[in-house]
Amino acid sequence: MKIVRFMVAMLSVAAITGCCDSNDKKCGDAVFLNEKAVMETIMTRRSIRDYKDEPVCREAMAEVLKCGIYAPSALNQQPWAIRVVDSKEFLDGVTAIAVAQNPKIAEQPNFRNFFRNAPTVAFIACPIESYSGEFDCGLLSENMMLSAWSKGIGSCCLGSVVPVMNSPEAKPYLERLQLPADYKLQVAIAFGYPATDLLPVAPERDETKAYYID
Ligand SMILES: Cc1cc2nc3c(=O)[nH]c(=O)nc-3n(C[C@H](O)[C@H](O)[C@H](O)COP(=O)(O)O)c2cc1C
């Protein structure tokens, strides 16, 4: 049944692209019509560190979550737990704890909350003991951030949230996430509509890190 579904999907793609014979394809030819859109989304995504107050609409977030869980995972174990919070009371509560622990963070320009002012935050957790949980959560996270960006929703991975959430003061908030007992919080991801239209410049990438071995 799964194979039939796959074949139907591939035939549909071929019908859309007019491509049936792989011999006709040139190196890098698009399989999907929206290849450019995918690459543009990847290349223009930046970590957004200031957002409008308006939480991400839940319908859009549902699609972002769906794209997340369609990420690959080892043996399709899907070893993640994702909790989305758009409660101002929750985010402000964690912010108060973070500021009490490190008052300097509140000195950042435009500071409103500890989540880079995001009104919606996804908390991503994976099993404490897992062969590939962290890796799989990384793939899930990137799927979420890219699909969000394709809808104009900005995002920022926030590793700095983890030690605060794991601190004794934040225990009530960690408990509210209802993570399975054998899971650890891996990362938080800020989501929201960027506060300005001006996108950050991409921090430099070192392209010498990837090359062919002949
Ligand atoms: C695992 C992880 C943790 C991160 N933690 C933070 C963080 O705590 N605060 C922050 O502002 N950015 C954080 N970032 C964002 C990185 O700083 C950012 O991705 C990097 O500088 C590249 O910039 P770009 O995302 O705009 O391409 C984190 C990114 C990753 C992947």
Image (cartoon, rainbow, N blue to C red):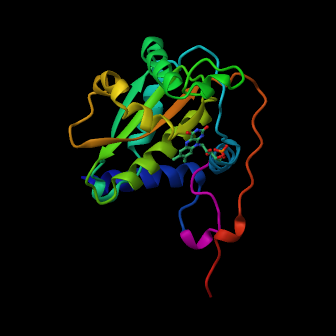
Examine the image and state in which quarter residue 11 appears: bottom left
Examine the image and state in which quarter residue 209 appears: bottom right
Q: Nearer the viewer, residue 94 or 15?
A: 94
Res. 32 in view: yes
Q: In this view, does 25 lie above or below 54?
A: below
Ligand 1 is found in the corner quadrant, namely top right
Q: Main secondary structure of the magenta part?
A: loop
Residue 85 in the image: x percent, y percent? 42, 22
Q: Which residue is drawn at 68% across and 26% down?
A: 108
Magenta range is 22-33
Is residue 23 inside the magenta stretch?
Answer: yes
Residue 121 in the image: x percent, y percent? 48, 27
Of the 4 image quadrants, the one containing the C terminus is bottom right
Q: In this view, does 119 lie above or below 12?
A: above
Q: How many numbered marks, from 0 up?
A: 0
Residue 95 in the image: x percent, y percent? 50, 21
Examine the image and state in which quarter residue 208 appears: bottom right
Q: Which residue is drawn at 60% across and 22% down?
A: 117
Q: Residue at x 44, y 14 (%)?
A: 87
Tell which residue pokes out farthest to the left in this image: 181
Q: Which of 101 and 166 is in front in this view?
A: 101
Q: Is residue 76 above or below residue 100?
A: below
Residue 62 in the image: x percent, y percent? 43, 27
Q: Residue at x 76, y 26 (%)?
A: 197
Res. 60 in view: no
